[in-house]
Amino acid sequence: MPVNKKQIQRMIKLVAEMRQNNYPNSASFAKLLKRAELVDNLNIACSERTIKRDIEALKSEFQAPIVFSQENNGYYLDNPFWVFQAPTFCDGYIASSMLGARIAEDVMPEPVKTTIRDAVDNELAGNNSNFFDVTYMESLLIFSGANTDVDPKIFHTVFEGWRQRKPLKLTYGKDDADEEPKEMRFEPHIIACRNGNWYVKGVNIADKKVLILAIFRIKSVDTYGIRFDIRKDILDDTRKNGLFDYPKLSNVKVRCAKEIAFYIREQQYKKKLTIKENKDGSLDVTLGPSTEFDIVRWVLAEGGKVEVLEPENIRRRVHDEALEAAKTNEIRKCPARRK
């Protein structure tokens, strides 16, 4: 049984990569560890040969159902129910696990929320770490912005289909639509929350097309049949282009007022901004690839503190929508008082 802390750290990350269907191999995982060492300051980088030894240790000592996929050139877990009973060395491991569960609990709809809550309570009951107490856990509030009701039974069935890689037989449609809900057989490859709504992305088995379904519009659903393999091309495309592959604009340039310069700098890395500071404290910013809708909405939300420099058509759209908003919200004149 391995007792080396760095080896366990590597194994945990490797299992996580396989659970996310990233199909790591010794070369790609070595690059990931090197990046983690540079970005996250984790001292766990190693050679490809060491990673191969870690894989063999997982198989022999933890009975990990690791299989190599020739099609995806990487490893995956053949049994999604296998549990990695990794030894922990310090509060940091417990902290990471518990914080992750707490965040998931506040984001997930029922009944998954209750399942996670029970797991958190069970862990707290058996944990003698000084890192946690009930007050600490309850003070960690996650504002997910979820605003659409999802039927708990439907969400649970979709979630289990995704978790177990089992196809779904469902009916789907809008409540106010004239046509009857459509029946389909569907492989759930990705579950995602965007702007407060939950979606499932996968393959319509009838025509093999990739679809995105809003879970709150699923009227009925059951799992059936045998397990399918997660398609790595769908995962890669979603990570690259987002859940909805809307056309994105590049090289949109704006000028941000001095008053909001501080938070623009804070978002530079995450939003891939190119920033040039002006003498008056304002910033000339080139935005990362973004949809026209998101750009216009953001500029208007800043209330005049962002000026679109180029392209002209975005500047004009901001101008026209601002005028329309002003017209809609025109200040009403008070009627003259009678003497």
Image: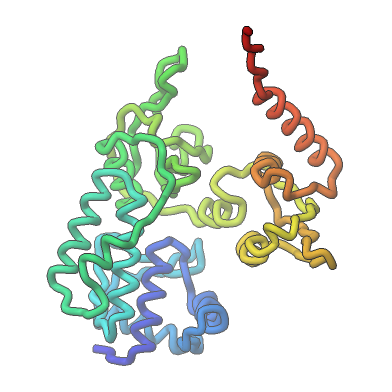
Determine the image quadrant of residue 54. bottom left
Query: Looking at the picture, does residue 225 appear above or below residue 287?
Result: above
Front residue of 208/107: it is 107
Query: Looking at the picture, does residue 117 appear above or below residue 198?
Result: below
Q: x, y percentage for residue 25? A: 48, 74
Front residue of 103/158: it is 103
Query: Looking at the picture, does residue 125 appear above or below residue 240?
Result: below
Q: x, y percentage for residue 200? A: 43, 42
Q: x, y percentage for residue 79? A: 28, 62
Front residue of 230/248: it is 248
The residue sitting at the bottom extreme is 4
Note whether residue 295 is visible.
no
Q: Which residue is drawn at 67% across and 24% down?
A: 331
Q: Which residue is drawn at 49% across and 43% down?
A: 195
The residue sitting at the front extreme is 339
Q: In which quarter of the image is the N terminus?
A: bottom left
Q: Is residue 200 left or right of residue 34?
A: left
Q: x, y percentage for residue 187? A: 40, 42
Q: Which residue is drawn at 46% across and 66% down?
A: 23
Front residue of 239/312: it is 312
Query: Looking at the picture, does residue 80 appear above or below residue 38?
Result: above
Q: Residue at x 49, y 79 (%)?
A: 26
